[in-house]
Amino acid sequence: MKILVAFKRVIDPDARIKLTADRSGVDTDSVEYKANPFCENALEEALQIAEEHDGEVVLVSAGGPDIDKTIRAGLALGAERAIRVEIEDTVLDSDLAARVFAAVYKEEEPDIFFFGKQAIDSDNNQCGQLVAEYLGLPQACFASEVVIDDDGEVATVTREVDGGLETIALTLPAVITADLRLNTPRFAKLPDIMKAGRKTIDVMDLDDLDIEDTALKIELVSLEEPSARQAGVKVGSIDELVDKLKNEARAL
Amino acid sequence: MSVTKLLLDESHVLLRKQCERFARAEIAPHATKWEEAGIFPRELYGKAAAAGLLGIGFDESVGGSGGGSLHLVVSIEGLMRGGSTGVAVGLWSLGIGLPPLVQSKDSFLTDTFVRPTLAGETIACLAITEPGTGSDVAGVRTRAVRDDATGDYIVNGAKLFITSGTRADVITTLCRTGDDPHGGLTFFVLTPDMNGVSVSRSLRKTGWCASDTAELAFDNVRVPATHRVGAEGSGFVTLMRNFQTERLALAAYGVATAELALEESLRYVRERSAFGRPIAKFQVTKHKLADMATKVEAAKCMTYQVAAAMDAGKYQGRDKALASAAASDAPSPAASVHSLRSSELNDARIDGVRPPQPATAPRSPRATPTPNLGLVKEVSMAKNFAAEVAVSVCYDAVQLHGGMGYMRETLVERLSRDARLLPIGGGTQEVMKEIIAKQLGL
């Protein structure tokens, strides 16, 4: 069984970020990157399935050579090799990323294509769905449990939906996107970290993949920083609090 | 950002992140409770082993994770993010308890004690200090006497300030087997199930509170000869090698302690207001923090540089890196008076012959010969410098926190107590200075 995992890097969510002077993006000069947490869940699930079904896990990511660090972190967790599609990752939108991944799928023909349910930087939650659509594959998004049958032909996926859980069965190959509660990603051990440095990252570009439509469908107009938090006030009594909530905040 | 980044490769960066993630998930939420309890759950050893954190710096052939001195340094920094030196040093007592066993290349000792400890199943500690002797290891009085009838050794004595000692399964104990102050020392592995081994006291400390510390008593303990580590008389040289790693680790604890205190202070001065503005706006605060940050950077540079130099043979594992450093270190005329060449060192270890004493220079019977292990001076300097930086930066951090800095609820209060041991443990500041001075030819 072969499992492909889309693996994206995001700016460390604990880091303080600034916008560039022209507000066209985030100033990336001194920011730290890490793997998108949902992608880590996707990789962990892929590794567990591969261990159980004697499979191979392949990572795929899109970006320049500087994303190799993040890819190596994924290889250290146990993926066997990786594919990096050379593209400036600042000019990607969900649709182009999906076209790239769909093209890689055709090269690799995996049984399962795992995604994180969304990336925590742009929060678009589109990529997995678009890939399934372009490839005509069944999809199960927001998975909180994945069971593959002994023959490796059917995935039974529990999805977190509003108000409860939905369990669906998909015929493989299929696209599955991972939710945070799917699993707890493992720790990379030092010997595996060392081995990751020697694993292969194959580099492809858009021409190799025959992607015709490379147009961006989303235009970034501008970014705004959240407004600074207003100072609070201290109230002297419960009555005053109720009065303020009623008459000033109009919350009651 | 620190210039020390230049010394790190991807494996160091990734490893540090892994350790940090473990510390934030498994240590930080419980640190205060464990500090107050004076101990942490035994299960944490298993969890740390499963995350691959216990075997760093130990060769994969003995059940370790491989890696070198710089990996060890960054792993300590990562673990310290849990906010408890006690937990970090408690987990790492194997880092000083196991290397003598590994060095002996004894497969019985490796399989019986090293592997299970690196797997997180058993706890190891190192027992050197005694009620009557500390940094002066030649004064060790715990005696192992060979029983000619059985070949066993009978051990009598007491050991003090033993980290993880109240519940250790593997007690790597330095004993006297001969009268020569240095050549008469031998390590043995004692276990708590042996008749006559007992914990006399669990000691209450100023800092490092989440780690247990014991006084141990040995009363006619019968120890099989298979538990002897290396040849009789090999203990001193083994210990000197062990000190190198221990002291580098203590430098790393110093760097990590100081860095945490600095970060806490930077956060606090932005939040805390006095006279109508955040105290970060006062020049006196800014200059104090500038000094603190400079000291942290300097200590970090020194510690990382020494670790990188120890790793000069790139990830051959601690022991080999140390040996190659020793071999490449041509002894200066001044230093060689009190030093062993690496070849002599190996002979001393393998054959159990007493390290040759220099014929020149009359010395007091207690003067300590210093085997030339390579970088002895630099490791001692890094340990002293980082320890001093930790103490001074924590002092300033408490000062910046004012009354809050004296409250148990702030991290800097704990760090300031934890830092105080660094110039004492693993060889006092004064003993480090003696070693440095000796290497300067004094």
Image (cartoon, rainbow, N blue to C red):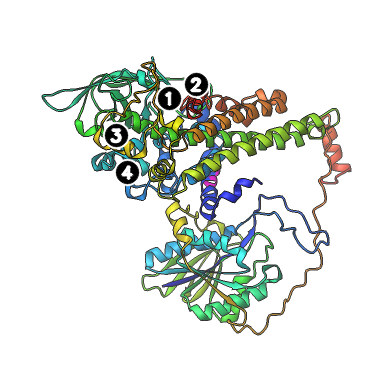
Which callout, 3 or 2, points at the residue further toward the start of the chain?
Answer: 2
Amino acid found under the numbered disc labelled 4:
Arg
Which callout, 1 or 4, points at the residue further toward the start of the chain?
Answer: 4
Label drawn at residue A166:
none
The structure residue drawn at horizontal position 57% and vertical position 78%, both measured from the top left corner, is A102
For the residues labelled 1 and 2, the Cα–Cα distance comes to 8 Å
Tags 1 and 2 touching, CB below 8 Å: yes
Image mark 2: chain: B
Specify whether B243 is left or right of B257: left
Which callout, 3 or 1, points at the residue further toward the start of the chain?
Answer: 1
Q: Which residues are magenta?
A: B20-24
Does residue B145 appear in this view? yes
Does residue B75 appear in this view? no
Mark 2 element type: loop
Residue corresponding to mark 3: B348
Q: Position of residue A14 (x, y in %)?
A: 66, 49
Q: Position of residue A198 (x, y in %)?
A: 46, 63
For the residues labelled 3 and 2, the Cα–Cα distance comes to 38 Å
For the residues labelled 3 and 1, the Cα–Cα distance comes to 32 Å
Amino acid found under the numbered disc labelled 3:
Ala
Image mark 3: chain: B
Mark 4 element type: helix
In front of the other: A77 or B186: B186
Mark 3 element type: helix
Tags 4 and 3 touching, CB below 8 Å: no
Label 1 packing within 10 angstroms: few (<14), some (14-19), many (20+): many
| Magenta portion: prevailing SS class | helix
The structure residue drawn at horizontal position 42% and vertical position 65%, both measured from the top left corner, is A49
For the residues labelled 4 and 3, the Cα–Cα distance comes to 26 Å
Residue corresponding to mark 1: B213
Residue corresponding to mark 2: B205
Image mark 1: chain: B
